[in-house]
Image: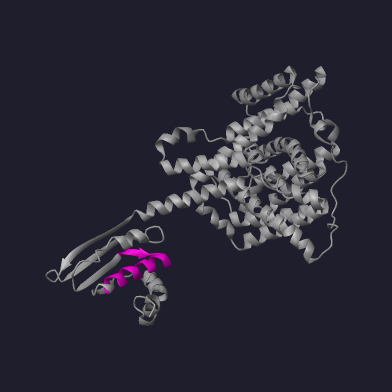
């Protein structure tokens, strides 16, 4: 009961106002993403309503906004062009089922393997992409001074009003006030209505009109699998960012299931697949939204606005919404990352910058994060591989040598381990003390085999002592140096 009160009713006034701001900001985005995917604007608008409402109840991160997104829209283009809207709706349902499966398999726990520098790069790249997405609205020969005047006024209201009062979100004031000014002065500037026709009816439950056979599955499964991965990746990253912004924790596995349930419902309501939106989520948080109520209100307000107040919504100047999105991009960018370039390690900076560059140039958040994760894994392996020391001391009046191995032996350090022994020394016995070492993988066990067999080839007796339990399990299972028949096979006898 306390959890329900905390998630839903601990911040009612701010959640209501923040939800209204987000609903207004969602409209042009949803229309734009529908155009990207090659479908009617109502497909994106219905999706944003459905996903926001369902994740408000089923999601694992209170205050996070999920809806139709650009990252998902670009993945749908070929499917829509080749097979049409009905196949997209079926792919959306399958995407949701795959995401629910990921949540049940607890794949959300994999987020702990994403380095902080990757998250910083993801945030910075997203801020740049949000800003770049606004440029078509404020550049070009057709732009007039009125557009720039409204944009400047919007930014001024957004940043200066909080100095006077924080009773209402400044983005909401900017949108309402500038819409009134544009209408009163009859300014000729682009509005939300110019982006596409608003829906005039509520969404209805529909089964996708496709043949249920293996051929259909072969068509939609690759698209659905890609959508599921990208959607979960963006949602998990966004949840992590909101965790930091609000100093609270989220349930990543519940979020996977929640995103899945939302996409299944959306496919049956005529909407396209979606996921968490960093831009709108930041608007929500910056406007005071913290609870599930803000997400629910955003979805419900969105539907009410586009269906019952579409004539008014259509009059909102795009320049006012662009001002809000520029505020979002500025607020999203991690400006401290510039200062940290001098303080942070070189490899962390490389990971962050690579994540930004790949994401910005490909416009694909999944590719950027994948590159960042791979690079951070490479740098980590390289660092750990250097934490290996092999020293030795003579024993029994020079007839024996004891090697002491300290550190981690795995694929990246195996060659150094093998090269650390003197195989030509004329002695009777070698003892390899690995009590302060750990053998992690088959490559490490193979390296130990090489060392033992090289000494034996020179006529030296070898004894390995001090294996910890985990290392001994690996060695007993995969090593060949203590299995005569395996050694004979290895030597070609």
Q: Position of residue 190 (x, y in %)?
A: 78, 26
- Residue 428 highlighted magenta (yes or no): no
Res 206 quadrant in image: bottom right
Magenta stretch: dominant secondary structure? helix
Work out which residue is located at the far front of the displayed protein and give it. Answer: 492
Looking at the image, which residue is at 66% across and 32% down?
Answer: 325
Res 219 quadrant in image: bottom right
Question: Which residues are the magenta region?
Answer: 436-456
**In which quadrant of the rendered image does the C terminus lie?**
bottom left
Q: Position of residue 274 (x, y in %)?
A: 71, 48
Note whether residue 17 is visible: yes
Q: Position of residue 7 (x, y in %)?
A: 63, 48
Observer-nearest of 4 and 211: 211
Looking at the image, which residue is at 38% across and 74% down?
Answer: 479
Work out which residue is located at the far left of the displayed protein and give it. Answer: 397
Task: Identify the colour scheme used.
Answer: one colour
Q: How many marks?
A: 0
Note whether residue 168 is visible: no
**In the image, is residue 87 above or below residue 36?**
below
- Residue 437 highlighted magenta (yes or no): yes
């Amino acid at each position: 009961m306390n959890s329900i009160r905390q998630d839903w009713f601990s911040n009612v006034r701010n959640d209501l106002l923040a939800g209204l701001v987000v609903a207004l900001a969602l409209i042009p985005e949803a229309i734009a993403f529908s155009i990207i995917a090659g479908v009617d604007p109502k497909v994106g608008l219905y999706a944003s309503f459905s996903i926001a409402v369902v994740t408000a109840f089923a999601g694992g991160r209170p205050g996070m906004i999920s809806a139709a997104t650009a990252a998902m829209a670009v993945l749908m283009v070929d499917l829509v062009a080749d097979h049409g809207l009905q196949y997209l709706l079926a792919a959306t349902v399958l995407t949701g089922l795959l995401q629910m499966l990921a949540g049940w398999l607890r794949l959300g726990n994999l987020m702990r393997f994403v380095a902080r520098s990757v998250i910083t790069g993801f945030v910075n790249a997203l801020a740049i992409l949000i800003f770049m997405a606004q440029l078509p609205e404020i550049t070009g020969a057709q732009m007039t001074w009125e557009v720039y005047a409204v944009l400047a006024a919007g930014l001024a209201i957004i940043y200066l009003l909080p100095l006077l009062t924080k009773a209402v979100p400044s983005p909401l004031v900017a949108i309402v006030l500038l819409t009134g000014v544009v209408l009163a002065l009859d300014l000729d500037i682009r509005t939300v209505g110019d982006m596409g026709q608003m829906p005039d009816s509520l969404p209805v439950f529909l089964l996708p009109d496709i043949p249920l056979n293996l051929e259909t599955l072969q068509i939609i499964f690759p698209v659905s699998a890609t959508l599921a991965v990208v959607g979960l990746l963006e949602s998990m990253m966004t949840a992590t960012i909101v965790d930091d912004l609000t100093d609270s924790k989220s349930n990543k596995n519940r979020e996977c299931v929640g995103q899945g349930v939302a996409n299944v419902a959306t496919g049956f309501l005529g909407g396209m697949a979606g996921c968490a939106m960093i831009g709108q989520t930041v608007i929500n948080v910056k406007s005071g939204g913290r609870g599930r109520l803000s997400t629910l209100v955003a979805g419900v307000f969105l539907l009410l606005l586009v269906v019952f107040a579409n004539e008014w919504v259509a009059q909102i100047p795009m320049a006012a919404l662009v001002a809000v999105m520029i505020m979002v991009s500025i607020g999203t960018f991690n400006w401290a990352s510039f200062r940290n370039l001098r303080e942070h390690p070189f490899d962390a900076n490389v990971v962050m910058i690579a994540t930004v560059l790949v994401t910005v140039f490909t416009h694909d958040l999944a590719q950027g994060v994948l590159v960042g994760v791979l690079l951070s894994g490479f740098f980590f392996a390289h660092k750990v591989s250097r934490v290996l020391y092999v020293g030795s001391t003579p024993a029994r009046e020079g007839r024996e040598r004891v090697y002491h191995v300290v550190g981690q032996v795995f694929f990246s350090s195996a060659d150094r381990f093998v090269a650390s022994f003197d195989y030509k020394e004329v002695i009777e016995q070698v003892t390899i003390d690995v009590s302060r070492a750990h053998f992690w993988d088959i490559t490490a066990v193979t390296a130990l085999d090489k060392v033992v067999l090289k000494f034996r080839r020179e006529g030296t007796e070898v004894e390995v002592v001090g294996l910890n339990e985990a290392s001994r399990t690996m060695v007993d299972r995969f090593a060949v140096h203590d299995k005569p028949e395996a050694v004979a096979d290895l030597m070609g006898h």
